[in-house]
Amino acid sequence: MRIVVGNVEHDVKVAACLSMPRLAFTDNFFTVTSTFAPHGIKVVKGTGAFWDQTMTRILTDLSKEEAGIDFICALDYDSVFEPECLPRLLSAILISGVDAIAPLQMKRDEKQLLFTPEGLSGRGEQTVTMPAEWWEKPAQIVDTAHFGLTLIRTAALRRMAKPWFLGVPGEDGDWGSDREDPDIFFWRKFRECGNKLAVCPQVAIGHAELVITWPDQRLKAIHQYPTHFWNNDGRRPPEAWGSQEHAERSSK
């Protein structure tokens, strides 16, 4: 893929990959096709019960030196993005010289971004406000990111010892909030061998997810995440038409 950064033209070899279930979002499929097909970029799909094992196999093959690939674009099957996101991320990683770069993406079901600012790994969830100038740079170093549309240098992967992905339970052996999921394990190992991970504040992608749409008490649409529905004992929001709270108010 040819890309111009400043006045310099770069010819880089890019491959893309994703681990996905047997059924997936068609919106993601068409964004992937419209982004990578025009550049003749190979997209490798793996399917299996274990995301981490599938990703390890694909990334291992694509990062071999004899494959001749400079960057791997790791994808998630529920990400949605425009074709111009890819060249903008390539420009950012070439300008900054970092070893991996991810766009901004929101977490499913929650109103927070999927990255951990530099130096905050292992400190639990906390609210951090970044200064305005932080968002103006092409790349900002972070501790963790995601795999939604993330560029990784193959040379950086070859520096990493395996396992690359591993789920680690908490101190009590359970999978509570103190666990380390395979993706977070990957980014920690990535940084421990000297690789630099960044996010590109100038590029954002979407996160496809199912929502439940209800009429509210003015018969206007309101949305509820399925997770919130089940965490609420399988009940609609209290402000929704026909909710128990609405029925109690109507009967008075």
Image: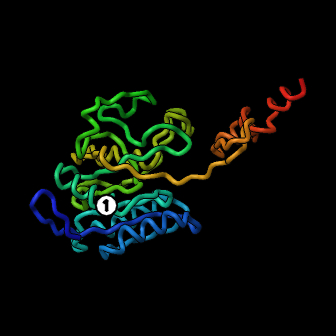
Image location (x, y in percent) of residue 36: 35, 70
Name the residue at the bottom extreme: 40
Q: Is 155 on the left or on the right of 142, as rendered?
A: left
x 50%, y 36%: residue: 170
Image location (x, y in percent) of residue 198: 28, 45
x 32%, y 73%: residue: 41
Closer-to-camera residue (125/53): 125
Closer-to-camera residue (74/8): 8
Q: Look at the picture and state if 158 lies above or below 230.
A: below
Image location (x, y in percent) of residue 28: 49, 63
Closer-to-camera residue (121/206): 206
Q: Look at the picture and state if 251 lies above or below 76.
A: above
Secondary element at tag 1: helix
The residue to which callout 1 is attached is: 86
Image location (x, y in percent) of residue 106: 46, 44
Name the residue at the left extreme: 7
